[in-house]
Amino acid sequence: MRSSRAIAPSLDRRLARDAARPGTLAGRPVGAPRAGGTTSTATWDWERLRVAARHHVRLTPATTIYVAVLGAVATALQLVGPAVADRILLQDSTNLHNMARMPVRVLAGSALFVDGNPLVWMLLALVLLGLMERRLGTRRTAVVFLVGHVVATLVSLTVVWHATRNGASNEALEQTIDVGVSYGLVAIAGCALGFLPGRWRWIAWAALVGYLGAYVLDTGTFTEVGHLTAALVGIALWPFARRSTVRVAAHARPGADDRARPGRPLPVPAGRPIAPLVTAGRGR
Protein backbone atom coordinates (compact mmCIF):
# COMPACT_ATOMS: atom_id res chain seq x y z
CA MET A 1 0.00 0.00 0.00
CA ARG A 2 1.26 3.45 -0.88
CA SER A 3 1.73 5.78 2.03
CA SER A 4 -0.08 9.14 2.39
CA ARG A 5 3.31 10.80 2.13
CA ALA A 6 3.68 9.45 -1.40
CA ILE A 7 0.10 10.20 -2.43
CA ALA A 8 0.08 13.88 -1.43
CA PRO A 9 2.73 15.12 -3.92
CA SER A 10 1.07 13.17 -6.74
CA LEU A 11 -2.33 14.68 -5.93
CA ASP A 12 -0.86 18.17 -5.72
CA ARG A 13 0.75 17.80 -9.12
CA ARG A 14 -2.51 16.55 -10.68
CA LEU A 15 -4.56 19.43 -9.25
CA ALA A 16 -2.01 21.95 -10.45
CA ARG A 17 -2.03 20.44 -13.93
CA ASP A 18 -5.89 20.53 -14.09
CA ALA A 19 -6.03 24.09 -12.79
CA ALA A 20 -3.81 25.22 -15.64
CA ARG A 21 -6.02 23.51 -18.20
CA PRO A 22 -8.81 25.73 -19.59
CA GLY A 23 -12.39 24.56 -19.11
CA THR A 24 -11.75 22.69 -15.86
CA LEU A 25 -12.59 23.47 -12.26
CA ALA A 26 -10.82 21.68 -9.43
CA GLY A 27 -9.94 18.74 -11.63
CA ARG A 28 -13.46 18.53 -13.14
CA PRO A 29 -14.65 19.96 -16.48
CA VAL A 30 -17.04 22.88 -16.02
CA GLY A 31 -20.62 21.61 -16.03
CA ALA A 32 -19.52 17.97 -15.68
CA PRO A 33 -21.13 15.81 -12.98
CA ARG A 34 -19.57 15.88 -9.52
CA ALA A 35 -18.64 12.75 -7.66
CA GLY A 36 -22.24 12.39 -6.48
CA GLY A 37 -23.53 12.45 -10.06
CA THR A 38 -25.10 15.95 -9.92
CA THR A 39 -24.41 18.93 -12.15
CA SER A 40 -24.52 22.65 -11.52
CA THR A 41 -28.15 23.70 -11.00
CA ALA A 42 -27.80 26.84 -13.14
CA THR A 43 -26.14 24.94 -15.99
CA TRP A 44 -28.74 22.17 -15.86
CA ASP A 45 -31.71 24.58 -15.78
CA TRP A 46 -30.43 26.66 -18.70
CA GLU A 47 -29.76 23.53 -20.72
CA ARG A 48 -33.25 22.20 -20.07
CA LEU A 49 -34.77 25.59 -20.93
CA ARG A 50 -32.82 25.77 -24.19
CA VAL A 51 -33.85 22.27 -25.23
CA ALA A 52 -37.50 22.88 -24.29
CA ALA A 53 -37.60 26.18 -26.21
CA ARG A 54 -36.07 24.62 -29.33
CA HIS A 55 -38.48 21.69 -29.08
CA HIS A 56 -41.48 24.04 -28.75
CA VAL A 57 -40.42 26.13 -31.74
CA ARG A 58 -39.99 23.00 -33.85
CA LEU A 59 -43.50 21.82 -32.97
CA THR A 60 -45.20 25.24 -33.33
CA PRO A 61 -43.51 27.05 -36.24
CA ALA A 62 -46.58 29.06 -37.30
CA THR A 63 -47.30 30.23 -33.75
CA THR A 64 -43.70 31.29 -33.23
CA ILE A 65 -43.58 33.26 -36.47
CA TYR A 66 -46.98 34.87 -35.87
CA VAL A 67 -46.11 35.98 -32.33
CA ALA A 68 -42.79 37.36 -33.58
CA VAL A 69 -44.61 39.36 -36.28
CA LEU A 70 -47.07 40.71 -33.70
CA GLY A 71 -44.18 41.82 -31.52
CA ALA A 72 -42.35 43.46 -34.43
CA VAL A 73 -45.47 45.33 -35.59
CA ALA A 74 -46.31 46.48 -32.05
CA THR A 75 -42.74 47.73 -31.57
CA ALA A 76 -42.82 49.60 -34.89
CA LEU A 77 -46.09 51.32 -33.95
CA GLN A 78 -44.58 52.42 -30.66
CA LEU A 79 -41.59 53.92 -32.46
CA VAL A 80 -43.51 55.94 -35.07
CA GLY A 81 -45.67 57.76 -32.55
CA PRO A 82 -49.44 57.89 -31.84
CA ALA A 83 -50.43 60.07 -34.82
CA VAL A 84 -48.72 57.93 -37.46
CA ALA A 85 -49.80 54.74 -35.69
CA ASP A 86 -53.46 55.80 -35.82
CA ARG A 87 -53.19 56.46 -39.57
CA ILE A 88 -51.67 53.03 -40.15
CA LEU A 89 -54.33 51.33 -38.05
CA LEU A 90 -57.09 53.21 -39.83
CA GLN A 91 -55.81 52.02 -43.21
CA ASP A 92 -55.88 48.36 -42.13
CA SER A 93 -59.04 48.53 -40.03
CA THR A 94 -61.99 46.27 -40.90
CA ASN A 95 -64.55 49.07 -41.00
CA LEU A 96 -67.25 49.56 -43.63
CA HIS A 97 -65.23 52.10 -45.58
CA ASN A 98 -62.17 49.86 -46.00
CA MET A 99 -64.14 46.65 -46.51
CA ALA A 100 -65.99 48.22 -49.42
CA ARG A 101 -62.70 49.16 -51.12
CA MET A 102 -60.10 46.49 -50.22
CA PRO A 103 -61.67 43.66 -48.19
CA VAL A 104 -58.93 41.06 -48.60
CA ARG A 105 -56.14 43.43 -47.56
CA VAL A 106 -57.87 44.68 -44.42
CA LEU A 107 -59.03 41.20 -43.39
CA ALA A 108 -55.44 39.99 -43.52
CA GLY A 109 -53.82 43.16 -42.22
CA SER A 110 -56.11 43.65 -39.24
CA ALA A 111 -54.94 40.33 -37.74
CA LEU A 112 -51.36 41.65 -37.53
CA PHE A 113 -52.14 44.35 -34.98
CA VAL A 114 -53.01 44.14 -31.29
CA ASP A 115 -55.52 46.38 -29.55
CA GLY A 116 -54.29 47.05 -26.03
CA ASN A 117 -51.26 45.71 -24.20
CA PRO A 118 -49.21 43.84 -26.83
CA LEU A 119 -47.48 41.60 -24.28
CA VAL A 120 -50.81 40.26 -23.00
CA TRP A 121 -52.07 39.43 -26.49
CA MET A 122 -48.74 37.92 -27.51
CA LEU A 123 -48.76 35.69 -24.45
CA LEU A 124 -52.34 34.59 -25.15
CA ALA A 125 -51.47 33.87 -28.77
CA LEU A 126 -48.37 31.94 -27.73
CA VAL A 127 -50.32 29.76 -25.31
CA LEU A 128 -53.61 29.20 -27.18
CA LEU A 129 -52.20 28.89 -30.68
CA GLY A 130 -49.22 26.90 -29.45
CA LEU A 131 -51.34 24.31 -27.67
CA MET A 132 -53.69 23.95 -30.62
CA GLU A 133 -50.88 23.73 -33.15
CA ARG A 134 -49.30 20.93 -31.15
CA ARG A 135 -52.66 19.16 -30.99
CA LEU A 136 -54.04 19.75 -34.49
CA GLY A 137 -51.04 20.64 -36.62
CA THR A 138 -50.25 23.91 -38.37
CA ARG A 139 -52.76 23.86 -41.22
CA ARG A 140 -55.83 22.93 -39.19
CA THR A 141 -55.00 25.43 -36.45
CA ALA A 142 -54.68 28.12 -39.12
CA VAL A 143 -58.09 27.12 -40.53
CA VAL A 144 -59.80 27.53 -37.15
CA PHE A 145 -58.10 30.87 -36.49
CA LEU A 146 -58.75 32.34 -39.94
CA VAL A 147 -62.35 31.14 -40.23
CA GLY A 148 -63.12 32.56 -36.80
CA HIS A 149 -61.43 35.85 -37.65
CA VAL A 150 -63.16 36.27 -41.01
CA VAL A 151 -66.66 35.12 -40.02
CA ALA A 152 -66.71 37.16 -36.81
CA THR A 153 -65.52 40.24 -38.71
CA LEU A 154 -68.22 39.86 -41.36
CA VAL A 155 -70.97 39.35 -38.78
CA SER A 156 -69.88 42.37 -36.74
CA LEU A 157 -69.76 44.47 -39.91
CA THR A 158 -73.26 43.32 -40.77
CA VAL A 159 -74.41 44.68 -37.41
CA VAL A 160 -72.71 48.02 -38.14
CA TRP A 161 -74.16 48.17 -41.63
CA HIS A 162 -77.65 47.44 -40.34
CA ALA A 163 -77.28 50.12 -37.66
CA THR A 164 -76.13 52.75 -40.15
CA ARG A 165 -79.03 52.01 -42.47
CA ASN A 166 -81.48 52.53 -39.61
CA GLY A 167 -79.98 55.81 -38.49
CA ALA A 168 -78.54 54.47 -35.24
CA SER A 169 -74.95 55.23 -36.20
CA ASN A 170 -72.92 57.90 -37.97
CA GLU A 171 -70.02 58.33 -40.36
CA ALA A 172 -67.44 58.01 -37.57
CA LEU A 173 -68.54 54.43 -36.89
CA GLU A 174 -68.17 53.53 -40.57
CA GLN A 175 -64.50 54.60 -40.43
CA THR A 176 -63.63 53.48 -36.91
CA ILE A 177 -60.43 51.62 -36.01
CA ASP A 178 -61.20 47.91 -35.66
CA VAL A 179 -58.10 45.70 -35.57
CA GLY A 180 -56.80 42.90 -33.40
CA VAL A 181 -56.31 39.19 -32.93
CA SER A 182 -59.14 38.64 -30.47
CA TYR A 183 -61.65 37.13 -32.93
CA GLY A 184 -59.22 34.44 -34.03
CA LEU A 185 -58.07 33.66 -30.49
CA VAL A 186 -61.65 33.38 -29.18
CA ALA A 187 -62.40 30.92 -31.98
CA ILE A 188 -59.30 28.93 -31.01
CA ALA A 189 -60.41 28.96 -27.36
CA GLY A 190 -63.92 27.77 -28.26
CA CYS A 191 -62.49 24.92 -30.30
CA ALA A 192 -59.91 24.01 -27.66
CA LEU A 193 -62.55 23.66 -24.94
CA GLY A 194 -64.00 20.80 -26.95
CA PHE A 195 -61.07 18.61 -25.95
CA LEU A 196 -62.09 18.70 -22.29
CA PRO A 197 -63.43 15.34 -21.09
CA GLY A 198 -67.11 14.48 -20.88
CA ARG A 199 -69.55 16.96 -19.44
CA TRP A 200 -66.80 19.49 -18.66
CA ARG A 201 -66.71 20.27 -22.36
CA TRP A 202 -70.37 21.34 -22.33
CA ILE A 203 -69.97 23.25 -19.07
CA ALA A 204 -67.01 25.17 -20.48
CA TRP A 205 -68.83 25.94 -23.72
CA ALA A 206 -71.90 27.15 -21.83
CA ALA A 207 -69.76 29.35 -19.60
CA LEU A 208 -67.92 30.88 -22.57
CA VAL A 209 -71.06 31.56 -24.60
CA GLY A 210 -72.93 32.84 -21.54
CA TYR A 211 -70.10 35.19 -20.60
CA LEU A 212 -69.78 36.66 -24.09
CA GLY A 213 -73.55 36.77 -24.54
CA ALA A 214 -73.90 38.78 -21.33
CA TYR A 215 -71.43 41.31 -22.72
CA VAL A 216 -73.50 41.60 -25.91
CA LEU A 217 -76.66 42.27 -23.89
CA ASP A 218 -74.86 44.72 -21.64
CA THR A 219 -72.94 46.80 -24.21
CA GLY A 220 -74.50 45.91 -27.55
CA THR A 221 -71.31 46.85 -29.41
CA PHE A 222 -70.35 45.21 -32.68
CA THR A 223 -67.04 44.08 -31.15
CA GLU A 224 -68.81 41.96 -28.53
CA VAL A 225 -71.07 40.53 -31.24
CA GLY A 226 -67.90 39.54 -33.08
CA HIS A 227 -66.44 37.83 -30.00
CA LEU A 228 -69.64 35.83 -29.45
CA THR A 229 -69.68 34.86 -33.13
CA ALA A 230 -66.04 33.77 -33.00
CA ALA A 231 -66.74 31.54 -30.00
CA LEU A 232 -69.66 29.90 -31.79
CA VAL A 233 -67.50 29.38 -34.89
CA GLY A 234 -64.79 27.71 -32.81
CA ILE A 235 -67.36 25.42 -31.19
CA ALA A 236 -68.84 24.57 -34.58
CA LEU A 237 -65.38 23.66 -35.89
CA TRP A 238 -64.61 21.29 -33.03
CA PRO A 239 -65.96 18.19 -34.85
CA PHE A 240 -63.62 19.03 -37.72
CA ALA A 241 -60.74 19.41 -35.27
CA ARG A 242 -61.66 16.21 -33.42
CA ARG A 243 -61.64 14.11 -36.59
CA SER A 244 -58.36 15.66 -37.67
CA THR A 245 -56.50 15.52 -34.36
CA VAL A 246 -52.81 14.94 -34.91
CA ARG A 247 -50.87 13.42 -32.08
CA VAL A 248 -47.29 14.52 -31.70
CA ALA A 249 -45.12 11.93 -33.41
CA ALA A 250 -42.73 10.00 -31.23
CA HIS A 251 -39.73 11.06 -33.25
CA ALA A 252 -40.54 14.74 -32.56
CA ARG A 253 -39.95 14.37 -28.82
CA PRO A 254 -36.46 14.75 -27.37
CA GLY A 255 -34.84 11.41 -26.78
CA ALA A 256 -37.51 9.48 -28.67
CA ASP A 257 -34.92 7.96 -30.97
CA ASP A 258 -33.81 5.82 -28.02
CA ARG A 259 -37.25 4.21 -27.64
CA ALA A 260 -38.67 1.33 -29.60
CA ARG A 261 -41.70 1.93 -31.79
CA PRO A 262 -44.53 -0.58 -32.13
CA GLY A 263 -43.99 -2.97 -35.00
CA ARG A 264 -40.40 -1.91 -35.54
CA PRO A 265 -37.29 -3.68 -34.22
CA LEU A 266 -35.06 -1.75 -31.88
CA PRO A 267 -31.81 -0.74 -33.62
CA VAL A 268 -28.76 -2.29 -32.00
CA PRO A 269 -25.40 -0.69 -32.81
CA ALA A 270 -22.59 -3.07 -33.65
CA GLY A 271 -20.59 -4.23 -30.70
CA ARG A 272 -23.19 -3.31 -28.06
CA PRO A 273 -25.34 -5.76 -26.11
CA ILE A 274 -29.12 -5.73 -26.45
CA ALA A 275 -30.03 -5.67 -22.76
CA PRO A 276 -28.82 -2.13 -21.90
CA LEU A 277 -30.66 -0.70 -24.92
CA VAL A 278 -33.92 -2.37 -23.96
CA THR A 279 -33.61 -1.09 -20.41
CA ALA A 280 -32.88 2.43 -21.61
CA GLY A 281 -35.93 2.34 -23.83
CA ARG A 282 -38.36 2.03 -20.91
CA GLY A 283 -39.73 5.08 -19.12
CA ARG A 284 -38.69 8.67 -19.53
Image (spheres, rainbow, N blue to C red):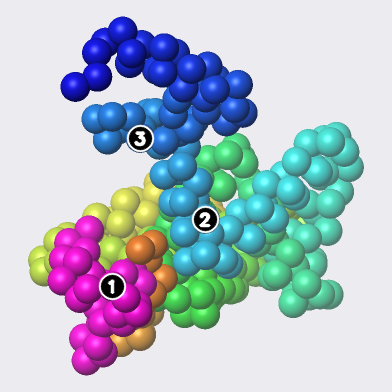
Taking the spot 66% from the left edge, 53% from the top edge, the residue there is: 68
Residue extending furthest top? 5
Q: Are marks 2 and 1 in contact (CB under 8 Å)?
A: no
Q: Nearer the viewer, residue 281 or 111?
A: 281
Side of 259 relative to 98 (left or right): left
| Residue shown at 22% from the left, 73% from the top | 273
The quarter of the picture where residue 229 lies is bottom left
Counting residues from the start of the chain, the first of labels 2 and 3 encountered is 3
Indicate which label's residue lies in the foreground, 2 or 3: 3
Q: Are marks 2 and 3 in contact (CB under 8 Å)?
A: no
The residue under the point 51% across, 75% down is: 138
Q: Nearer the viewer, mark 3 or mark 1?
A: 1
Q: Is residue 195 left or right of residue 123?
A: left
Q: Position of residue 99 (x, y in %)?
A: 75, 72
Dot 3: element? loop
Give the Cα separation between the discs numbered 2 and 3: 24 Å
Answer whether residue 231 is magenta in the image: no
Q: Nearer the viewer, residue 59 or 10?
A: 10
Dot 2 falls on a residue whose secondary structure is helix
Rate crowding at label 2 as few (under 14), some (14 to 19) or many (20 or more) other CA atoms within 10 Å: few
Q: Measured from the top left, where is residue 175 in percent x and y?
A: 77, 57
Measured Cα–Cα span from mark 3 to mark 1? 24 Å
280 vs 220, left or right, is left
Q: Quadrant of residue 39?
A: top left
Q: Residue at x 28, y 73 (%)?
A: 272
Q: Which residues are magenta?
A: 256-284
> Which of the labelled discs sits on residue 272, or is there none?
1
Pointer 2: what residue? Answer: 54
- At label 3, the amino acid type is Pro
Name the residue beneath numbered marker 3.
33
Q: Which amino acid, mark 2?
A: Arg
Q: In whole angstroms, how far apart are the C-alphas of marks 2 and 1? A: 31 Å
